Structure formats: structure tokens, C-alpha cells
Image: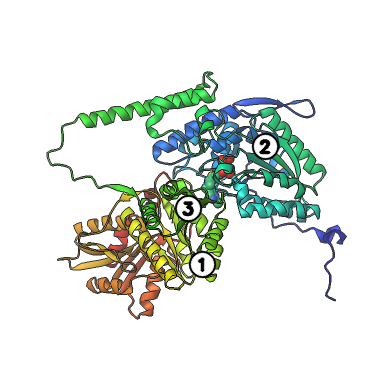
Amino acid sequence: MGVELAAAAAIPPEQRFRKGLTYPNPLAGNPGKPKFAATVKRADGGSETVACPVATRTMVALMDMNAVIGGAACHWGGPAALAELMSAIHGVMFSASPWHQRFNFANDAGHTENGVYALKANYGFADVTVNDLKAFRSITSKLTGHGESHLFPEGVMVSNGPLGSSIPIAQGLAMADVLANHKRTTICVISDGAMMEGEAKEAVSAIPGLAGKGLLAPFVLVVSDNNTKLSGRVDEDAFSMQPYFNSLESQGWKIIKLANGNDLQAAYSAVESAVATAEAHPTQPVAIWAKTVKGFGVASTVKSASGGHGYPLGGGDVAGKLRAFVVEINGGKPLAPEFEAWLKELEDAAVAKAEKAAKAAAAPAPAAPAAPAVKKDKIQAGFPKAMIAAAEKGLPVVSVSADLQGSTGVAPFRAKFPQLSFEVGVAESNMVSTAVGFSKLGYIPVVDTFVQFGATKGLLPLTMGVLSQAPVIAVFSHTGFQDAADGASHQGLTYLAASGSIPHVQQYCPASAEEAEWAMGHAIATFAKERQAGHHPEATLFFCGRENFPVSLKPTGVEYAWGKAMTVADTTAGKAKSVVISANGSLVTHAMKAAEKLAADGIGAIVLNNATPNHPDVPGHQAALAKCGGKLVTVEDHQALGGAGAMLLTKLAADGKLPSAAKVLGVQGEFGQSAYTADELYNKHGIGVAGIVAAAKAIA
Ligand SMILES: Cc1ncc(C[n+]2csc(CCOP(=O)(O)OP(=O)(O)O)c2C)c(N)n1
């Protein structure tokens, strides 16, 4: 018989507990009272001052407008739903001093972090001011799109953004507190869409199970149940989560039902009682099942199917709609002078901008006619066109999505063929595995999500699909810094490295909508041909950015060919010195601009669209290198390590024909951050036009 481990409880305390390593706690200490305050009654009959949730919503609306004007997308509905609960939680936490010795706080609902920033500004917590909110999501701010511990350690304990990833970390915090014998309560906030994630579900069952064995410190989960996710209502689009929430009790949770999570007093009492209950009985975690209203405070966002998930106003709405929006949030009452001044500042800037535009329009037309405008579109726009065409031809294409179909571009296919379209909820692993099932039974499944989620949560399912001879086609969008505003947690920068060496996987990075349409059409047709011939197709992963690019980069007379790197620019004629620039996806147009600049300085360039990174066109690159003295610059919106450049150099080396000089431009082992536009991040990391020019000049 093997040696049995003694149950931890039977081990004497001096051996049972072990402290973690100490390092300076970066979290800010307790703030003073909030500037915009509300009063609630405590259970002991006294009153407590908490942050006013209406002020939170007002600040979110105004800071979102600043960011939107700068070019960043933002969130409104989620933070609006959670304003009362966040006020209540912070009120309870800050009543202990120092709060972080008594509480761990993890916000799984990372898209609502702007509401938490607003609340922090209200308290002046971690020195955040109301003025700081105006730079939300900009490259200069630590108030990034989602909470980022690497940039704002004094305010964010656990980075968030990918839904369902913070609750298991919160589980770890509570387990570590037991091991350290530290009396602390962990509070985690999550919303119902995120509860669909496998990661969340694993923690939801592990927490009561391990707590029951005495392995977790007191744990409080606050669930915001508004039956709404990003693309619409949870039950209508996917399936109802109510049976799952009902099952929490039998999974071991103590449930506190909160019928109106947007009632501040009720929210405060629920949080207060949940903390007291969890602390009195640490072996049973407590979940507040709170019904909330997404987009609360503005009737039109409450009504909209997504609960006003994204900020519903655009930069052009400052003059017409912003005041009405903010006044509605405030129930028609006058705004606090600070908010009125902020609103006025936005309005004045909009007026000044309109006057400037009118002046420019009235100015006499320039003598030389302007070059015709280049038609632009998102690269992703091509995918559904090819999917629709294939389905119309009778091919069994199906779309399996995980709540991002409106953002990845496949929505038009789903609108046209609802009977061929499925949504599994916010659950990327499940999405890919479900598609694998369809593939096994002869369908051509197309899955879609942001690359950061597809190339992490989706990769084992994808591997198992290939291994089961049931591959899928994937549209993974928002590559790298193209998802500028959402910040580091959303900026997939390892997708080529992560997926490129999985056997029987084809990577494709189109650089334009036209190319995306052609490549998707080719991938579907090849998939069908292989299956019909009794072979197993390869999996195809499409990666694309999110901004607008010219709809075609194809020179006249050239045809697309899978695996051939198209020459999209050649300025070598008559130049003594030249380089090859090998780019993919969203950086192909940047490489072309760099080639123009280099040509003006007397350096030629052949720009190759290396669209198939893990199967690069070796002969095509060799031919171009032969014309350019063997000088190669590769550039990608990806980590340099393990990316397209690295894969290309490996293949060239295997062929015994390495370049005479090479520069591999990519991100150098760092995370990103929020910015209004991708170009700001490209320039910061030396992979924009200037970076390409400098690298080319260094080796030409
Ligand atoms: C892993 C992951 N998948 C997808 C997303 C994109 N996303 C952001 S918010 C959201 C919907 C969130 O729904 P829910 O959790 O219910 O929040 P609420 O609707 O209440 O704001 C989605 C799909 C994400 N952030 N993380």
C-alpha cells in the first residue's frame, strides 16, 4: 500500500500553513469618501456612504465619448448594469482598513472595468482623478480598455478582459489565503455571458467542492444576470442560463437572490450579508444571483437587443445626442458642475471641429485634381461573401459562433442562412469542438472569434479536430494591435507561433477583403474536394485585423494562388540597392507605404504578401531575394519570436538559401496596451512604416 497523505487538517498548524514570498503590495490603500456619494443603511442600522451609481454612469458616458472621438470603441451596457453592485462592493470593502488585507477583489467582467475606473475616480482611489478618465483607452493612460495589472498595479489586482478567466484566478487567491492562514474574503464579479465559459464553469464547480474541504478562504461571487451578452439576449441567441443558475445551489453554493441588482440599497444589503455569511461559514461559498438590467439608465439601450453593449453614440453625436443621453442618466436633473463642464468641453470641441471642417470645405478646390479615393473595407468583409456563394452552390457550409459574429464579419452569412448557423454562447472551446462534430459528419464548419480567444481557448479543440480527421475552418479576427483600444488582454500576438506547427493546419492572413473572399472560397472548395475524394482536408485558420484597408491590393493581370506570395509592389527598377519586404495581413499596406518612402530615398523594394506564414512561398521569396542582393525585412503584427519571419527564415535555411542580411520586425517579447489606433502601437513597437523604412535602410 502506498503512503497516504495526511489530510491537511490533521497536520499541526505550524506545519500546515506556509506564507507566500513577500513582495511590496502595489494596491493603493483606502481612499477617503467619494465625491459623488449616496447613502445606504447598514445591517447594524447605521448609515454608510458609497459611490453614487448615477455618477458612475455619467462618467462612463462622458469618458466613452472622449475615447470614441479619439477612435476607440467602448462599452456602456455592462458597466451601466453593474453600477449599483460595484458601488455596494466597494462600499463594503473600503469600510475595512486596509481594505486589501481584508478583501481580494477580481472583476471577471473586464469589459465593465470603465465603470470601476469611474468609481475609482469618484473616490480619488490610487490617485485617479475625474480628469484622468478623459484619456481612457488612449496610449498615454493606465486606464486601459480592460483592467491591466501590468500598467495599473495600484488599481487592478487581477488583469481581466477574456471572460471567465478571472474567476478561476479568484479561486486561487482564496486557496492561497488558506495556505497562508490569512483571514481574507475574496469577492469576484462576473456576468451571465461569462458564466457560459468552460473556465468559469470549472471554477464554479471547484470552488464549493474545495471550500467544503476547508481549502478556500471565504468566497463571494456576484453574478450579474441580465440575460444579455454582446450580440443579443442569452436565451434567444444561444440557450437559457437559468437552469444552470438554479443548479448552483446543488453544486454547493449558498445562494442569495437579488431581484433588483440596480436597487442600490438592496445591492448593498446583499453584498453585506454575503460577506458576513461567507466569513461565518468559509466552507460554503456564497453567490449573489443578481438580476440586473444591461444599459440601465437609458431607455433606448435597455431596449436594444444587446443592452447597449458598445457605446451607442459616435463622435458625431456630441452636438445632437450626448447631452440628452447624459441628462437621461441623471433623470432629467441638472448635472453636477464638474460633469456639466466636461460635457460643455466636449460640445465646444465638437463645434470648433465642425467650424474647421466647414471652413476647409468652403476653401477653393486645389488646382491639381485629387487622386481618386481608394475604396476601403474591413478585410473580414470578404469571408461571408465566399461562405454565402458556397452555400448557394449547395455545399454544406455551417457557421458555429460564440457571440462575436457581429465583430468577426461572418454575420451576413448567418443572416442569409439562419438554418445553417448556430451559437453556443460565450464559449470558444465549445464552439470549435462543436464544429469538429459537424465536420466529422460531412459539414464544412466555419467558426469565428477574436484571435486572442481562438488561438488560446480554441487550440486544443482544434488539435483534437485535426486528430479526429474532422478539421474546421476558422475566422480569427482582431489580430495583434489591430485590437488597439481593447488593450493587452485582447491583443493576440502569439497566434502564428501557437498554431503554425500543429500538423495539417494551414494559416492564411489575407491583406484585403477581395483576397479574403478569394481565399475563403478556395479553402471551402478545397475542403469539399478533399472530402468528396475520400481524403481528410486540412484545417484552415484565417487571421485578419479589424481596421479598414484598400479592398484590393492585387496588381492588374496577377491572379491569386494559394501558397504563392504575391508581389504587391516592386520599386527595384533602376535602383542600385534594394530589399525584399515580406509582410502579411494588416501590415502589407504599411510595407507598401514603406516601399514608396524608400524609393523616394533611392532604395528599391519588392513587397511580398506572405499570406501563408506556416507554409511560406520559399521559391517566391528566393526569386525576390535574388533580385535584391539577398536583403530581407520581414514585418508582422505578432511577436517576432515564432512568427511569420521566423518561420520563413527556418524554411529558407532548410533550403540552404538564407538571406545575406535580415531584419525580423515584430513585437519584442512585450505585452501591448490600449491605444486609439493600431498605428500608435505599430509605431511604438517599431513595426509601422517608419520602422520598416529604418530596418530596410539598415541592411540595404
Ligand atoms: C473569452 C472572451 N470571449 C469573448 C469576449 C468578447 N465579449 C466581451 S463582453 C461579451 C459579452 C459579455 O456578456 P456578459 O458576460 O453577460 O456581460 P454583460 O452582457 O452583462 O455586460 C463578449 C462576448 C471576451 N471579452 N472574452
Reply above or below: 119 against 434. above
| Quadrant position of the C terminus in the picture | bottom left
Asked whether disc 1 touches disc 3, contact meaning CB atoms under 8 Å apart, the reply is: no
**Disc number lying in front (1 or 3):** 3
Quick check: can you spot residue 550? yes
| Quadrant position of the N terminus in the picture | bottom right
Q: What residue sits right under mark 2 in the picture?
A: 290
Dot 1 or dot 3, earlier in sequence = 3
Asked whether disc 1 touches disc 2, contact meaning CB atoms under 8 Å apart, the reply is: no
From the viewer's perspective, tell me whether residue 421 is left or right of residue 367: right
Residue type (three-letter) at the residue carrying disc 3: Leu
Q: Residue 565: horizontal and vertical position, in percent? A: 30, 67
In-front residue for pair 360/426:
426
Distance Cα–Cα, label 2 vs label 3 = 34 Å
Which type of secondary structure does the marked residue at label 2 adopt? strand
Dot 2 or dot 3, earlier in sequence = 2
Residue 470: mark: 1
Q: Residue furthest bottom?
A: 656
Which type of secondary structure does the marked residue at label 1 adopt? loop
Image point (78%, 25%), residue name: 45
**Disc number lying in front (2 or 3):** 3
Residue type (three-letter) at the residue carrying disc 2: Ala
Q: What residue sits right under mark 3 in the picture?
A: 420
From the viewer's perspective, tell me whether residue 97 is left or right of residue 548: right
Q: Residue furthest front?
A: 394
